[in-house]
Amino acid sequence: MPQADLARGRQAIERVGCAACHRIPGIAWPKGALGPSLQGFADQGLIAGRLPNRPDVLTAFVRNAPATLPGTTMPAMPLTREEARDVAAYLYATGSR
Amino acid sequence: MQPAAAETGPGWPASIFDPAGPYAGSITTLSWLLLAMAAGVFLVVLVALWLALFGKERLQKRLGGTRTIWIGGIVFPVIVLSGLLVYGLSLTRNLAQPVPANAMRVRITGEMWWWRVAYLDAQGQTVNTDANELHIPTGQPVVLELESSDVIHSFWVPQLSGKLDMIPGRRNILPIQADRPGTYGGQCAEYCGGPHALMGFVVIAHEPAEFRRIIAARRAPKQQAASRGSELFRSTGCAACHRIAGTNANAVAGPDLTHIGGRSSIGAGILPNNRGTLIGWIGDSQSIKPGNRMPAYKMLPAQDLAAIADYLEAQQ
């Protein structure tokens, strides 16, 4: 993803605590288990089993999941648009590690 | 390119080199002084060693003489260490001085693995309860009565004071002070079993006027309208352990949730407080803080988790 910054994405993930629900590569603690593991996300077929796994969709989903997929357990997270893009980039980058 | 482990709690990582008040300040000054003196003495020893090994013969003789041993090994340490003792004790005198009788008092009780917080009035009666977070005014000492209800814990907010053990059956007194507004992280500093490392604490210091406003707002009577969240709080069993003042949830086994919506952190100072972390904690706190005494509620569907989170977020 152009212009996205993996280091900033990681910082945003830590700041809002995504790992409270998700196991995320590179995040030592926590390893939350209420939501799915996000390991290998680039290779995953669908987001939340319903949405196409595309950068634009993932960027929208990590920031405001209920607006993207009504009924999902994942709530809107306090991320800016830029941070959401960085978070998505981080998740895709860790998939190929 | 792998940065350090996630430090997600507010006020973390807590700096031990950046004191925010007089109690932590004197300790930090003493620490630097000790470090500098140790480095100085180490340097002198290294130079003496080098001279003894490679110096001119005349110097080697002098270094090995009885006179050098007397001066360098006995007189010098006695003078330096005595001076240091006197200076160190006078520097940290403020730690042992009696605290002002009219200072704000708060009782903090160590629990496995969180902190019970009770704001006290002049008579020592509890006027407001909270957990895992403490609001204080800046520029004045606040007296903490440290107790424990189970094992030995140790209360440590490095930027505000030294650490002090919380011992079952005893009440230890620790004054803290913050001279500038801010969020200061704390940590249990005595191994207390299980998730001890995840027993964090947050102190938030406000300007005195702002502090008075916050406390007044907390003590104002609150309207509690019945909602799906409040009903679930009762029916799923949350109220068996948690208290929310003004409702019929009055249990004291777990952290008081009367002000959970206004707290900066959850899980005892370890995670930021937002909708996502709150749902993650309610649904499966065991994967976040393994061994803590709250069971996982993985059987709750999405809309129930959201309703409980709604209800808790409204508890300011």
Image (cartoon, grey):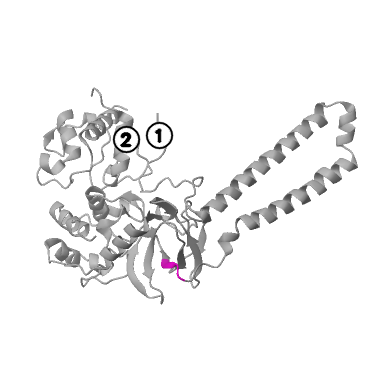
Residue range in magenta is: B102-108
What amino acid type is highlighted by mark number 1?
Answer: Pro
Q: Which residue is mark 2?
A: A10
In the drawing, does residue B242 fall left or right of residue B72? left
Mark 2 neighbour density, 10 Å: few (under 14) some (14–19) many (20 or more): many
Specify the subunit that label 1 lies on.
Answer: B
Residue B1 among those drawn in magenta: no
State the residue at coordinates (36%, 73%): B126
Residue B256, percent across and down? 30, 65
Q: Which residue is mark 1?
A: B3
When the figure is inspected, residue B67 is found, relative to residue B304, above or below; the finding is above
Do the CB atoms of the residues marked 1 and 2 lie less than 8 Å apart? yes
Have a look at marks 1 and 2 and say if they share a chain. no
Residue B103 among those drawn in magenta: yes
State the residue at coordinates (29%, 54%): B285
In which quadrant of the rendered view does residue A18 lie? top left
> Disc 1 to disc 2, how far (Cα)?
9 Å
Residue A61, percent across and down? 16, 37
Residue B26, percent across and down? 56, 53
Residue farthest toward the top in the current orientation of the protein: A2
Which quarter of the figure is the N terminus of chain B placed in? top left
